[in-house]
Amino acid sequence: MTLDAAYPTIRGVACVLVHAPGLLRYGSKPSREIGKDGVLSKVQGALRSFDDAVAYPPNQVFIGNHAPEALWDVPEPWWRSGIAGAKPRGPFGEIVSEDELWGLMRLADEFGLVRVGDERLARARELLARGGLWTDADLERVVRPTQRPAGANVSALERSEAPTSGGDGALQLYAADGSHVGSVGHGYPDDATQTPDVLLENLACKASGAAAIRSLLRQLALDPREIDYVLGCGEEAVGDRYQRGGGSISKAMAEMAGCALATGSDVKAFCCAPVHALVMAGALVQSGVHKSVVVVGGGSLAKLGMKMLGHLAKDMPLLEDCLAAVAILVGPGGASPVRLRLDTVGKHTVASGGSAGAIYAALVTAPLERAELRLTDVDKYAVELHNPEITVPAGSGNVPRTNYRLIASLAARRGEIGRDEIDAFERRHGMPGFVPTQGHIPAALPYLAHALPRLRDGTLRRALFIAKGSLFLGKMTNMADGMSVLVDRAS
Amino acid sequence: MILGAAEPDYVEMMAETVTAGDPTYTGPLAGVSLGLPVYHVTEPEMKALSDPAVYRDQIELSELAMETERIWERVRQARGRTETA
């Protein structure tokens, strides 16, 4: 095998889940529903324990203890098919418990916004120390007294241990069992972009994203100072009233993860930002600007409990109780046999058109034709890998299956497969969805963690990563966006 | 009401939503029976009304990807209930 220098390479991928049942009530959908009669108690009654979240088969796939394809054989419903003896740690990362989360939130908070009781922080420190992901200095910061820097709303902080939301609007935090944990205060007074709920979302994204970077560094036994640049691809708007989406949460994550010699910036393109960011990371490395670039997507608190009404109606547990984060290290040619094929990138242009045929022509046919590959030459297609057990009961369909049937139909129309082979394409070239509905996180890249060892050992030759973004949700255009990139093994 | 969704179960749910009312009780049409005649865009009746060039360009690939027989069956059932109501 020759390791060529013509392409940047994928050196490692980390996938982390943060079990956050107590924060679920502050997801966008739950926060709009729990004021209604009896909804809060229904939500509380449908939360999963940490053990159940760990044993949940799709979560075990996410952290790499099982292959996605193993889910074909797990009896449905998957939430009743918990894996006995499942561990919260796998080859790609870990599942962080809620008890640890409170400590991470304090660690993420540089402005004294988050107040958590001393006992919980001591417990968080102990558990985080056991996990081995954080340094002694980090652990000290978990239990340090809360500072009150200029700009923080002091009255909110002073009220922070009150059991309900005060008139000044400090947001009260609760654990899964309903017990009071602490609070999140305001940023600048009267700044609608720094209300406690917004800051909580941003801190949750920062904390989970930084945990994914840490996990990546541990996986590769890498000095954090080797990281040059961090590209964030999450969807949170970090800023203030004059620059609502100012950024850069990526540099904040780099700081928390100890990447002292890195800076970073955020790539925004709704759910297809991760693939945009991966291509940009490759370009930065290949051009020689940077040597080691991390692409990171933090978890999305807003999407916790997004489909909860469908789950409650069907007496299911609330499966959207985890923040999910992914971090990928892109390095120079020769650093790994797994190549990021910058010559095989698909993009949905302004002129591409919005039909399924037009989108897949742009994202699948066009790049593969440039590489002189047939659709069937791609071993695996990574699409929007939403867990169908979350989306189907809420009426949103099986998202990956729809994608695979479209790609299969494209192959059939081109005569590469027979029309009677469309049904089998999903199993041959696809996989079941296994990723929580965390927006940008299900967008293809979690499969890169699974593909990496298989590309290394040669059981996989190439995989195409495809993401689409619903730009129209932002009201600036009616268009969607899409981006794809091929990853293969040096031959 | 013309539906375009790709999955039989989803189509059935949408068809029921705009005829008998939202079966998931998650949206504003929970318990609201609109009784609209409902079709899927790939059904022969709808296809016959379409410009063939536009249909080929915009819908044909999606149609190929869909299990249309199952989709049509579900929509026809929902429509049948409306017509007999």
Image (spheres, grey):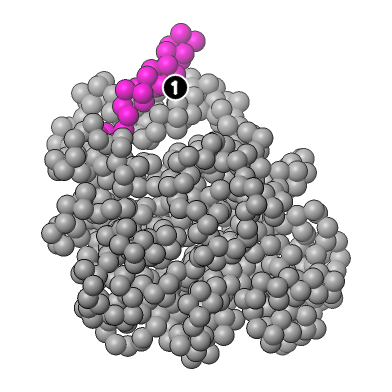
The chain letter under disc 1 is B
Looking at numbered disc 1 in the image, what kind of residue is underneath it?
Answer: Leu
Specify the quadrant of the image occupied by residue A37: top right
Local packing at callout 1 (Cα closer than 10 Å; few below 14, some 14-19, many 20+) is: some
Task: Inspect this view and state whether residue B59 appears.
Answer: no
Rendering coords of residue A379 (x, y %): 28, 53
Q: Confirm whether residue B80 shows in the render.
A: yes
Q: Which residue is mark 1?
A: B36
Badge 1 element? loop
Q: Which residues are magenta?
A: B63-85
**Residue A338 position within the rendered picture, expressed as x and y whole percent measured from the top left:** 31, 70
Confirm whether the magenta stretch covers residue A70.
Answer: no
Residue A52: image location, x then y, percent: 67, 49
The residue that appears at 48% across and 77% down in the rendered structure is: A220
| Quarter of the image with the N terminus of chain A in it | bottom left
Residue drawn where x is 49% and y is 10% of the image: B85
A314 or A457: nearer the viewer: A457
Name above or below for residue A81 compared with residue A157. Answer: above
Magenta stretch mostly in which secondary structure?
A: helix
Give the left or right position of residue A116, taking residue B78 as reference: right
Q: Which residue is drawn at the image coordinates 34% and 42% (left, top)?
A: A426
Residue B82 belongs to magenta span: yes
Q: Nearer the viewer, residue B60 or A123?
A: A123
Q: Tell me the quadrant of the picture where the C terminus of chain A can be found.
A: bottom left
Question: Of A155 and A304, which appears nearest the observer?
Answer: A304
Question: Quarter-wise, where is residue A36 in the image?
Answer: top right
User: Disc count in the image?
Assistant: 1
Q: Residue at x 31, y 58 (%)?
A: A460
Of residues A273 and A470, the one drawn nearer to the viewer in this rendering? A273
| Left or right, A305 with reference to A420 | right
Relative placement, left or right, of A164 versus A350 is: right
